Image (spheres, rainbow, N blue to C red):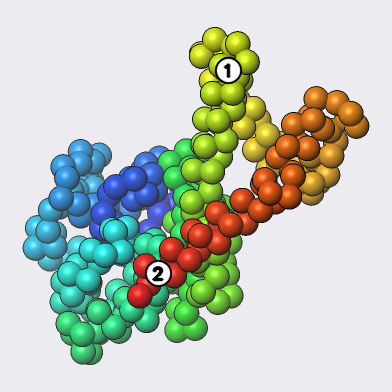
């Protein structure tokens, strides 16, 4: 397919941090005429339009994909409305926790004959600069065309990983969906430590941020395992080894990082109930 072919048309429901991050990337790559449904005002380039309610949307607008990017707790009301307007829709949910079963039950409760195809995705905020990574799951009823449309849309803002079972989306959420915050925290703490070691704030910030950025870029471009890259930077008895002796102590990162990711995965599971 030509790179100039517009991306599938979307009805983006919710344009907060995640929805907005994806929208930025999609607009850069070119969408078929699409609609953003959000209570906050948004200025969109033509032919795209903003709507505050489904009744504001033109009756002849039929999106290729409906993106659910609202808070999980606020999804039920909009699902009932969607069922009335788009009973056979392809829905791409980027909400943490909410299972396909729970979403479909809410959808069909409003319109018993409705038969949506619901695909789940967990993107992350680097989608805004085309550097995202998104885990996706499609149920058996999803067609190849529906999966390809979703994959093409998401690939325009980063990489994709399709998991084989839905429960693995919780693990994706914990590792990559929430993951940028872990990297931001590392940069924040490195900057603070640099200031404590005597560096001016601006220099400490630049050093910390660009180090995190550069290490990430090297990881992306290298075929080497992360552990091997770490080993190559670590001279025996050197400064890096001294720092890693603290970070890799049994009670430090080897314990706290898995605990943090497990806590995020557990919270994703709780949101599904």
Return the x and y of residue 236 as percentages of the image width and height. Answer: 90, 32
Q: Which residue is mark 2?
A: 270
Q: Which of these two is toward me, 20 or 49? A: 20
Q: Which of these two is toward me, 3 or 116? A: 116
Q: In this image, 192 relative to 245: left or right?
A: left
Nearest-to-viewer mark from 2 and 1: 1
Return the x and y of residue 109 as percentages of the image width and height. Answer: 21, 85
Above or below, 189 against 31 in this view is above
User: Which residue shows up at 60% across the image and 11% down it?
Assistant: 198
Residue ranking furthest to the right: 236
Above or below, 189 against 260 in this view is above
Q: Which residue is mark 1?
A: 196
User: Which residue shows up at 54% across the image and 43% down it?
Assistant: 182
Q: Secondary structure at mark 1?
A: helix
Q: In this image, 260 relative to 70: left or right?
A: right
Residue ranking furthest to the front: 251
Return the x and y of residue 111 as percentages of the image width and height. Answer: 18, 85
Q: Secondary structure at mark 2?
A: helix
User: Which residue shows up at 29% across the image and 59% down it?
Assistant: 71
Q: In this image, 151 relative to 59: left or right?
A: right
Inspect this view and state whether residue 186 appears.
yes
Inspect this view and state whether residue 206 appears.
no
- Disc 1 packing (10 Å; few <14; some 14–19; many ≥20): few
Return the x and y of residue 244 as percentages of the image width and height. Answer: 76, 36
């Amino acid at each position: 397919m030509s790179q100039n072919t517009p991306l599938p048309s979307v009805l983006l429901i919710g344009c907060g941090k995640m929805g907005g991050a994806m929208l930025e990337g999609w607009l850069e790559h070119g969408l078929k005429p699409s609609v953003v449904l959000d209570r906050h005002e948004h200025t969109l380039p033509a032919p795209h339009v903003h709507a505050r309610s489904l009744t504001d949307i033109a009756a002849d607008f039929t999106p290729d994909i409906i993106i659910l990017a609202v808070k999980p707790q606020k999804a039920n009301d909009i699902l009932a409305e969607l069922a009335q307007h788009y009973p056979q829709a392809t829905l791409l949910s980027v909400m943490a926790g909410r299972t396909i079963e729970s979403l479909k039950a809410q959808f069909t409760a409003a319109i018993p004959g409705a038969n949506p195809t619901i695909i789940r995705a967990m993107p992350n905020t680097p989608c805004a600069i085309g550097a995202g990574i998104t885990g996706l799951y499609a149920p058996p009823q999803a067609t190849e065309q529906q999966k390809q449309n979703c994959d093409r849309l998401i690939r325009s803002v980063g990489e994709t990983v399709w998991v084989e079972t839905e429960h693995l989306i919780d693990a994706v959420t914990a590792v990559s969906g929430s993951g940028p915050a872990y990297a931001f925290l590392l940069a924040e703490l490195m900057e603070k430590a640099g200031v404590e070691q005597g560096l001016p704030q601006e220099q400490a910030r630049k050093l910390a941020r660009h180090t995190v950025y550069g290490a990430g870029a090297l990881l992306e471009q290298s075929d080497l395992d992360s552990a091997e890259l770490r080993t190559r930077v670590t001279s025996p008895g050197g400064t890096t080894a001294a720092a890693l002796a603290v970070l890799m102590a049994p009670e430090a990162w080897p314990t706290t990082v898995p605990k943090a990711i497990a806590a995020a995965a557990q919270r994703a599971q709780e949101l599904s109930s």
